[in-house]
Structure formats: C-alpha cells, structure tokens
Amino acid sequence: MFIDNNMRVDLSKFEVGDSVKKYHALVIYVELLMRAVYKQVKFDDVTLERGQCIISYDKLSERTGLAKRTVQNVIYELEDNGYIRITRQKKCNVYTLLHYDWTY
C-alpha cells in the first residue's frame, strides 16, 4: 500500500512503471479515497458499503486533469495491483478501496 497508517505516501511500493504513472495513480487513488463513503449509503438501486464510491471516467478525468484514457489505464493498474476492486453495474462502476480502513 502506498499510504501507510500514518498517512505517509510511499510510491516505491506501488508497482506501476515510471514516476509519472505513479503520480497519476496517486492522484486517482486519492480522488477515490475522498469520494469513498464511510458508512452504508443507498443511491437509486445501488447500495454502497464503507470504502466504496461511484464515479465515471469522465468525472475522474475532469477532477484530476488527466486524459480519460489515462484514467482508464490507471484504474486498471490499481485493480491489477490489488488496491481497488471494480464491480460493474448496469448504470455505473462501483469502486471498492480494498485497504480503506488502513487509511484511518
């Protein structure tokens, strides 16, 4: 995990290519972290549990200033490296931060 119990960031443990990709991964992970719910919430027909959020690639792109394709690539890298899990729904993707409780 690149955020430890003391909220320090250690990019050396994040196994993604070069430093630019690591920076992009950190920016996107922090955005997901800020949007994650801390208790169960129901949105329309989707129930979000602690540490989950819903956000589109377009919105992530807008919020982070990264290209949509970059956002998609980084999201897949985060999933492949075990930082998030993506649950695909009919209308949206639900992102689960797998180590959410480690950040508090």
Image (tube, rainbow, N blue to C red):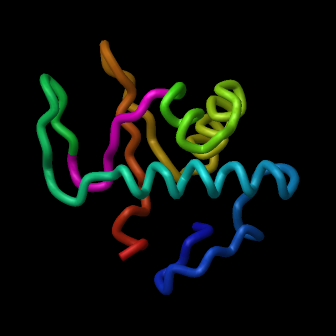
The total of numbered circles placed on residues is 0
Please name whichever residue, 54 or 86, is drawn nearer the observer in this view of the structure. Answer: 54
Q: Quadrant of the C terminus?
A: bottom left
Please name whichever residue, 6 or 35, is drawn nearer the observer in this view of the structure. Answer: 35
99 left or right of 29 in image: left
- Up-down: is 103 above or below 29? below
33 left or right of 58 in image: left
* Image quadrant assignment for residue 93: top left
93 left or right of 22 in image: left
Q: Residue 101 placed where, x, y %? A: 34, 69
Please name whichever residue, 66 or 82, is drawn nearer the observer in this view of the structure. Answer: 66
| Residue at image location 58% in from the left, 67% down from the top | 1
| Residue at image location 84% in from the left, 58% down from the top | 19
Query: What residue span does the magenta drawing correspond to?
Result: 49-56
| Residue at image location 63% in from the left, 74% down from the top | 9
- Up-down: is 49 above or below 75? below
| Outermost residue to the bottom | 6
